[in-house]
Image (cartoon, grey):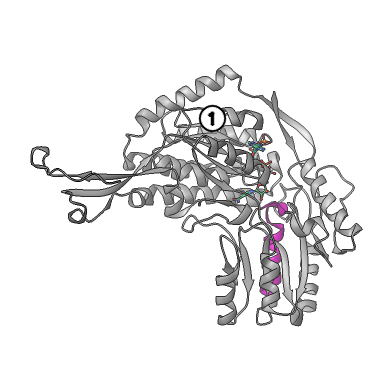
Amino acid sequence: MAMSVINPATEETMQTFETLSAVELEERLDWAATTFATYRRTDFATRATWMRAAGEILDRDCDTIARMMTTEMGKTFVAAQAEARKCAVACRYYAEQAAGFLADEPADAAAVGARQAFARYEPLGPVLAVMPWNFPLWQVMRFAAPALMAGNVGLLKHASNVPQTALFLQDLFVEAGFPDGAFQTLLIGADQVEGVLRDRRVEAATLTGSLPAGRSVGSIAGGEIKTTVLELGGSDAFIVMPSADLGRAAAVATTSRCQNNGQSCISAKRFIVHQAVAADFQQRFVAQMAALRVGDPMNTDTDVGPLATAAGRDDVEALVRDAVERGARVLCGGHRPDRPGWYYPPTVITDITPAMRMYHEEVFGPVAQLYRVHSIDEAVALANDTDFGLGSNAWTDDPAEQDRFVRDLEAGAVFVNGMTTSYPELPFGGVKTSGYGRELSRHGIREFCNLKTVWIGAESRRSETVTETE
Ligand code: NAP
């Protein structure tokens, strides 16, 4: 099977790669297992030197890497540069912090009858990472930097439309000094994931992607009793209350919905506005969405480039068509332009009802749903009326309302008066069908560790016999 790089802005096929054969895949898994046997014994300081070097390469080659991502999946060049730099920051963060996050945790030895007792974080082994194309570098780095710093071996199965970035990542870690085999890119299709996941040499898996892919990987890994982290979709609420600064809220709403050409899991997707300020917010928001410049993602003044795949644009169009056929109103956008490339314009749509698909499903493109509510109770109820629970956003200067949103929004994150985003310092993940487990921060690096209990008694000749208990 072949994987093609197709430029979403031109629809031209630029390069094609062959996927791994069964024999090659078997060799790679063997290599992962043998590499882990030695890599796990490297110390934090050595790994940190290599991880810092990876960060330096990302900064040094930022423009080249950004061009590769833009031509491969259509994000704007400016956004791609920012993504490469953010990855460099994450490399430095885990280089600095890993030893502290994974330091032995002493326990009360006397209380458990030991001379010494503590808990130790140990690496698990080769970890399979099934990753999406939307942040082709960042999604991988937020797995790879902590996993490698913890002493695991990384096996990347990247999305089939970004093989160049996938191969770049393997080269990056080798150039940075990591042992060959410590981070491997496996050019395989989704149909080869099950075999890798069931292989005894693979100890754990992480998947960032859609709900169907998450269900499949989660259930296979569950059957094999292997630990998983699942980062799935979202349909985040963005609530605007009367006390909010509407100018800032509308500007952030526009950025949040259209960043990455509307293809971000934590983009705000459902805009829930209090009736008292709804007309004002709508006027500002629609004007800003309509004013965004759609075009060649390599131009530095372009705000919104093409969607990454033809199928992705078809999905967005189908969701908008379904809503309009059932009575929704389009306030701006709503039609694909007549030009080459998989473009879709920033769109605002209102009068959405539960009978429409987009009320329940994630829209992975620059389409904003606008709702009006009459109270905070109604806002919270509507925000939570979804199977997803990734991020959420609330705009209010009223401390009591802020507390209410922090307490009652069913999501992995609540951002008040600022855009929902990811930082190396903060845990990232979802609840409900947005997944489980956490990436980033101290929590992310511990996901792929064996927390080993260590109990050391007095010299064996002097140890007393104890009663057996569980
Ligand atoms: P996708 O189709 O699920 O693809 C993601 C990855 O999973 C790709 O590597 C894909 O491989 C693989 N895959 C697909 N089906 C699979 C299966 N049945 N078994 C094993 N692997 C499978 O997702 P997408 O549509 O490209 O990406 C967008 C989705 O990702 C959205 O729902 C978005 O919200 C979510 N996302 C979530 C986060 C987060 O952190 N929560 C971040 C970014 C994106 P192929 O490419 O070979 O099919």
Q: Work out whether residue 293 can be spotted.
A: no
Find the magenta span and give its range.
Answer: 247-264
Residue 72 occupies quadrant? top right
Residue at figure coordinates x 77%, y 74% from the top left = 372
Residue topped by disc 1: 198
x, y percent for residue 35: 41, 27
Quadrant showing the N terminus = top right
x, y percent for residue 230: 57, 46
Q: Please determine whether, in this image, residue 292 is positioned above or below residue 190.
A: below
Residue at figure coordinates x 66%, y 65% from the top left = 384
User: What's the amino acid at mark 1?
Assistant: Arg
What is the magenta segment's predominant secondary structure? helix
Report the side of 169 relative to 177 (left or right).
right
x, y percent for residue 152: 42, 37
Give the image quadrant in which the ligand numbered 1 is located. Answer: top right
Cβ at disc 1 under 8 Å from ligand 1: no
The residue sitting at the top extreme is 23
Foreground residue, 87 or 453? 453
Report the side of 166 relative to 3 (left or right).
left
The residue sitting at the left extreme is 462
Per the image, is 33 magenta?
Answer: no
Give the SS element for disc 1.
helix
Residue at figure coordinates x 17%, y 55% from the top left = 110
How dense is the environment of label 1, judged by Cα within 10 Å: few (below 14), some, or many (20 and up)? Answer: some
Foreground residue, 77 or 391? 391
x, y percent for residue 416: 58, 71
Foreground residue, 411 or 416? 411
Foreground residue, 467 or 233? 467
Q: Work out whether residue 123 can be spotted.
A: yes
